[in-house]
Amino acid sequence: NAGVTQTPKFQVLKTGQSMTLQCAQDMNHEYMSWYRQDPGMGLRLIHYSVGAGITDQGEVPNGYNVSRSTTEDFPLRLLSAAPSQTSVYFCASSLTPYNSPLHFGNGTRLTVT
Amino acid sequence: AQSVSQHNHHVILSEAASLELGCNYSYGGTVNLFWYVQYPGQHLQLLLKYFSGDPLVKGIKGFEAEFIKSKFSFNLRKPSVQWSDTAEYFCAVNANSGGYQKVTFGIGTKLQVIP
């Protein structure tokens, strides 16, 4: 049972480049989400999904797109990377979208130069 | 909107010392509260949670937390820390308003336990 798997672990981008951070879970969780972790700011919610085909914005959605075509996968897309998006990104899932503990992936450390 | 404050950003303790990490939240309604821990090089994992009932909740590895509604607090405690408790600890809150969860995290407290 792998839990929540994120790839890649590390990534360096140049300003303006695009990329997709991958997240997959094998626990049949309904709810999936993306957070970014920055020093002194804790984790902030970017986007979340409550099921295939259903996504919504979190606290800091600008510059990021998501989609959820299957229960298992929830990729995060950066269309035009900016230095302000340098961060550690965590994907998290939970069994239900209501009051359910989060299970986290190992994170992706992204640097935008 | 809900928010979470963690008062201690960096705590250094000797082994066997007692630990208390402060956490306060702001939200006027019913909340679910969590403490997550991130050991060096690992992902965040759930330490304990409060949904309802007994305000004193016990988690893994001897940790406990007490929900004090009147103080909007959910402080984490451990009577005697070990070197293996060195980690970053995050308090989190979800407003239990009937809608989809949007968990808000505090900025974290880095705990360093000195052998």
Image (cartoon, coloured by chain):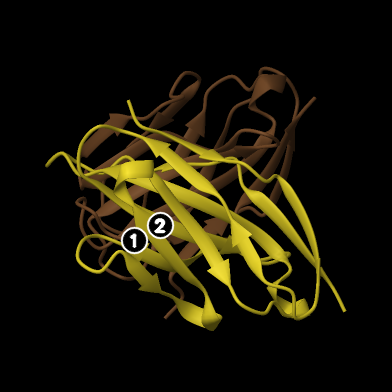
Residue B88 image-quadrant placement: bottom right
Horizontal and vertical percent for residue B96?
A: 20, 44
The residue carrying mark 1 is A101
Residue at the far right in the pictured view: B115
Quarter of the image that includes the C terminus of chain B? bottom right
The residue carrying mark 2 is B34
Horizontal and vertical percent for residue A76?
A: 46, 38
Colour yellow belongs to chain: B
Q: Colour of chain A?
A: brown
Does dot 2 land on a helix, a strand or a loop? strand
Residue pictured at 26% horizontal, 62% vertical? A29
Quarter of the image that includes the N terminus of chain B? top left
Looking at the rendered structure, the kind of residue marked 2 is Phe
Looking at the rendered structure, the kind of residue marked 1 is Pro
Residue pictured at 37% horizontal, 42% vertical? B72
Residue pictured at 12% horizontal, 42% vertical? B98
Residue A106, compared with residue A81, is above or below; it is below
Mark 1 or mark 2: which is in front? 2
Left or right: A81 with respect to B63? right
Is disc 1 in contact with disc 2, using a CB cutoff of under 8 Å? yes
Left or right: B51 with respect to B60? left
Residue placed most toward the observer, A84 or B111: B111
Residue at the far front in the pictured view: B70
Horizontal and vertical percent for residue B84?
A: 73, 78
**Which chain letter matches label 2?**
B
Residue placed most toward the observer, A97 or B68: B68
